[in-house]
């Protein structure tokens, strides 16, 4: 008897193609995953799409496993339903289509090619036509990724040149180059003490910027193995550039060639590195009325004097010769010292402190390595050096004090110290006492006003950012505020608070900018303040009064200490970089699976918009995250046209307060008690010892496996804002996917996805913006009027630093430090790169 008879239904049925078996199993597994997780999401009140799509994919897979053509028909229904759902939920927003349609199109393409192999085969011409359509959809969708998405043009035209009106701050004659730099100089971190980051140079223009070439390159030789990120912006005064390396080595370079002239090494140990080996810059100061000494003559004098052996890497100088430090470079170090060296030779200034050094930790009590670090250049106003410092946060509630200190710029003698919890005291604490521990600190760059004698301090938060129950009245008053200090007395003249009882690490990160703001009554001396939550404010810098609109709004309450939460917060009506609150639709991923996981995390988290308090029973969403908005790179201002340029981050954090007992079980200890430095990002498992809770911050809200961010792109942008009105001129995503990709793999793709960024910009009078900052390791030139990228150069490492622009011997240069950044996951380096036009085309 034969194995099959004419009535046997298997007679003439083609064998199941191996790829059909594989595809059917993939669809079954995918259907089970989407259906199961989708049911969880639906139960949480989320979208029902994933339940329905999962059921459809499961049924399609089962039918295809049986080699049935009906399985393809079911898949077609899933595909059509996905199209309808995506359009209903996302409209024409390209980035929202990627996870919703990419995978179903790719699997549909494979299925279409296999249709002729089914039990009831589909003609090959039909199969190929369907495959062609789906392949074209996938190809066009992928190609569209290379077209920038999300750029916005404002409603008003670019402002006319207002050079006659002048929005640059009015200044009396000043003996300091940092107040009134020569046109070709960059004499302070923000070019001048006004911190506009605006250069009057015009040799490089939108028409010729495409011809820029590498003019010179210098390597510092200082590259930490952990926590790298130099963040340095050099100064240029006369014929010399001055900079600091990652671990605070001071270096002077020839402005024409980039060749090293001198170096001073303060020998900072790796143990002193806080979250990042960052030295953002140095300060330049000329002693009034003291003639400077030619460096050649200084060397001759030093040889004749036969002094004690100088520090390694410096030229010897005659000890006690005050004129030799008539011009001096002053920096703060990662281990809490102020260093003053002669600008011509790098020799420590013998009349400054103890042979050119001052220890700012005196009076602070116990200071473990890495807990007190000066990462920003100090401000110098009326001969007074004012410095804050970074306090290693998240470790202890009783961390060292955030006291603000001022020193004589010539002698290094302490002028005053502002300890907000001991306002009656102006000097060192009495014997046996310390400055108040755990007070808010100023880790970023202050702004000095020589004319008013004020220094403006963007203040951080009290130690233990995410717990407020043990803060004092003065800590609550001055935290997350801009505080104006009278440099003569060390007492606050006024303060402006942007966040009340901050438990989001929304400390002031950006340097404020001095401007003359036009009002109906005339120009007012003003200060422009960007914030991490994205709001921009303009204040009268004499009084602290708001010159632009703001209003109180109710904000979410609750959290672990509801009695501490302020019912209202201040919101700027002038301008904000902040985007609308997140919704489930904003959750993203490369595939529907990771998008679904992010949707579930969104639904299970505590989130009621900005200022949602942190919680312990579940995660909370902080948006914007602690990188801003605007962070330490600050904004740039073109006073000629009255335009603000602001790059910003647009990412949430996914946070959870961890109860003390759980943190103890996890072994979360303060930095000085752990055996090995994990090198983790700020907030990622910080113990907050001395409070009921540790904190675990998922910065950027990444998925643990793919390392992709849960929010849809863009993750960062850059925009131009009309200074007078606060109205948007243009906005565009900033940063490509070259340095980003799933599983931490750098894709190399020039897709303008808008990346996280750290560092600011510089503007030139010719209408160019120069900026690096993004994670794609590019230095860009952008048209100030349109936002269009005109040129870029590939850097050998991450460019997380502010660029600077200078001119020497008739040639204009653009300089950027390419040091990389461990937190931003950009490659480490020790490069100082200078670009200029070819000599023949200038």
Image: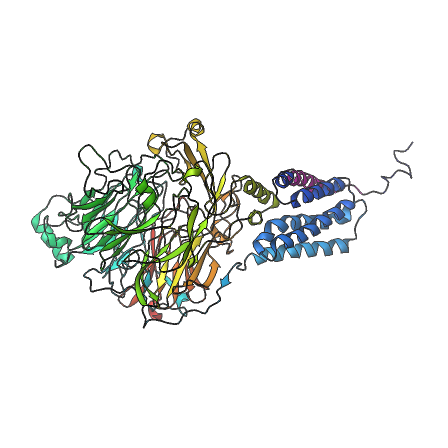
Comparing 88 with 22, the one in front is: 88
Count of numbered circles in the view: 0
74 sits left or right of 793 in the view: right
Quadrant position of residue 689: top left
- For the C terminus, the quadrant is bottom left
94 sits left or right of 411 in the view: right
Q: Residue drawn at (9%, 47%), measured in percent from left and top?
A: 306
Q: Residue furthest left?
A: 304
Quadrant position of residue 520: bottom left
Dominant secondary structure, magenta: helix
Q: Position of residue 175 (x, y in %)?
A: 18, 61
Magenta stretch in the rendered image: 14-36
Q: Residue drawn at (20%, 62%), measured in percent from left and top?
A: 174
Q: Position of residue 241 (x, y in %)?
A: 26, 57
299 sits left or right of 780 in the view: left
- For the N terminus, the quadrant is top right
Compared with residue 709, is residue 238 higher up or lower down, i.e. above or below? below
Comparing 159 with 129, the one in front is: 159
Using the rendered image of the protein, determine whether residue 397 is visible from the camera's viewpoint. Answer: yes
Using the rendered image of the protein, determine whether residue 445 is visible from the camera's viewpoint. Answer: no
Q: Position of residue 716 (x, y in %)?
A: 46, 53
Q: Is residue 541 magenta?
A: no
74 sits left or right of 47 in the view: right
Comparing 113 with 674, the one in front is: 674
Q: Is residue 29 magenta?
A: yes
Q: Position of residue 831 (x, y in %)?
A: 34, 52
Tell me how the rendering is colored: rainbow
């Amino acid at each position: 008897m034969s194995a099959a008879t004419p009535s046997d239904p298997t007679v003439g049925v083609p064998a199941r193609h191996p790829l059909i078996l594989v595809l059917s199993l993939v669809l079954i597994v995918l259907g089970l995953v989407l259906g199961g997780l989708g049911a969880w999401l639906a139960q949480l009140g989320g979208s029902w799409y994933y339940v329905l799509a999962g059921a459809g994919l499961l049924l399609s897979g089962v039918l295809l496993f049986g080699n049935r053509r009906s399985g393809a028909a079911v898949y077609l229904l899933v595909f059509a339903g996905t199209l309808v759902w995506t359009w209903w939920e996302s409209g024409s927003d390209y980035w929202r289509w990627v996870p919703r349609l990419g995978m179903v199109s790719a699997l549909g393409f494979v299925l279409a090619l296999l249709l002729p192999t089914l039990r009831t085969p589909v003609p090959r011409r039909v199969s190929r036509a369907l495959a062609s359509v789906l392949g074209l959809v996938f190809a066009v969708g992928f190609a569209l990724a290379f077209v920038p998405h999300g750029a916005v043009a404002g409603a008003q035209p670019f402002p006319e040149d207002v050079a006659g009106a002048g929005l640059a701050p009015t200044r009396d004659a000043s003996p300091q180059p940092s107040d009134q730099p020569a046109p070709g100089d960059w004499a302070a971190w923000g070019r001048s003490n006004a911190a506009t980051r605006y250069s009057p140079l015009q040799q490089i223009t939108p028409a010729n910027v495409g011809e820029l070439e590498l003019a010179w390159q210098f390597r510092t030789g200082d590259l930490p193995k952990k926590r790298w990120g130099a963040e340095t912006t050099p100064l240029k005064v006369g014929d010399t550039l001055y900079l600091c390396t990652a671990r605070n080595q001071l270096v002077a370079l020839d402005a024409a060639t980039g060749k090293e002239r001198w170096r001073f090494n303060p020998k900072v140990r790796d143990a002193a590195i806080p979250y990042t080996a960052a030295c953002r810059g140095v300060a330049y100061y000329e002693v009034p009325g003291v003639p400077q000494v030619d460096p050649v003559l200084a060397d001759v004098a030093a040889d004749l004097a036969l002094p004690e052996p100088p520090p390694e890497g410096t030229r010897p100088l005659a000890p006690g010769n005050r004129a030799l430090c008539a011009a001096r470079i002053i920096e703060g170090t990662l281990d809490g010292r102020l260093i003053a060296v002669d600008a011509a030779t790098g020799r420590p200034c013998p009349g400054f402190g103890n042979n050119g050094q001052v220890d700012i930790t005196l009076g602070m009590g116990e200071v473990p390595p890495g807990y007190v670090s000066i990462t920003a250049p100090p401000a110098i106003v009326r001969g007074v050096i004012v410095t804050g410092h970074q306090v290693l946060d998240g470790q202890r509630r009783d961390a060292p004090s955030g006291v603000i200190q001022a020193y004589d710029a010539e002698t290094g003698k302490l002028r005053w110290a502002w300890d907000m919890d001991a306002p009656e005291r102006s000097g060192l604490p009495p014997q046996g006492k310390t400055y108040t521990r755990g007070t808010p600190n100023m880790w970023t760059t202050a702004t000095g006003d020589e004319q008013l004698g004020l220094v403006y301090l963007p203040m951080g938060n009290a130690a233990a950012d995410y717990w407020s129950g043990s803060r004092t009245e003065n800590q609550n008053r001055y935290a997350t505020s801009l505080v104006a200090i009278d440099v003569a007395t060390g007492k606050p003249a006024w303060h402006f608070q942007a966040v009340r009882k901050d438990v989001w690490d929304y400390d002031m990160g950006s340097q404020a900018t001095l401007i003359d703001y036009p009002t109906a009554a005339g120009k007012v001396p003003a200060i422009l303040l960007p914030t991490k939550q994205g709001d921009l404010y303009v204040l009268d810098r004499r009084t602290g009064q708001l010159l632009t609109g703001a209003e109180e709004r109710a904000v979410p309450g609750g959290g672990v200490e509801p009695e501490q939460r302020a019912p209202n917060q201040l919101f700027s009506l002038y301008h904000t970089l902040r985007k609308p609150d997140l919704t489930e639709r904003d959750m993203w991923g490369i595939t529907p699976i990771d998008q679904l996981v992010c949707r579930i995390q969104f639904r299970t988290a505590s989130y009621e918009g900005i200022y949602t308090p942190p919680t312990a029973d579940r995660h909370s969403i902080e948006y914007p995250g602690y990188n801003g908005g605007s962070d330490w790179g600050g904004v740039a201002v073109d006073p000629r046209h009255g335009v603000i340029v602001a790059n910003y981050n647009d990412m949430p954090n996914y946070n959870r307060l961890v109860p003390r007992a759980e943190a103890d079980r996890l072994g979360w200890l303060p930095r000085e008690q752990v055996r090995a430095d994990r090198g983790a990002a700020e907030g990622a498992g910080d113990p907050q010892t001395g409070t009921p809770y540790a904190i675990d911050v998922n910065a950027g809200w990444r998925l643990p496996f793919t390392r992709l961010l849960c929010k849809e792109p863009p993750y960062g942008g850059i925009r131009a804002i009309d200074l007078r009105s606060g109205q948007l001129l243009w906005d565009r995503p900033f940063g490509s996917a070259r340095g980003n990709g799933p599983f931490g793999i750098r894709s190399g793709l020039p897709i303008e996805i808008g990346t996280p960024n750290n560092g600011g910009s510089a503007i030139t009078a010719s209408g160019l913006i120069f900026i690096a900052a993004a994670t794609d390791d590019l230095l860009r030139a952008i048209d100030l009027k349109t936002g269009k990228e005109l040129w870029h150069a590939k850097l050998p490492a991450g460019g997380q630093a502010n660029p600077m622009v200078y001119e020497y011997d008739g040639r204009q240069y653009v300089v950027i430090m390419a040091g990389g950044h461990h937190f931003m996951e950009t490659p480490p380096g020790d490069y100082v790169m200078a670009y200029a036009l070819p000599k023949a085309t200038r």
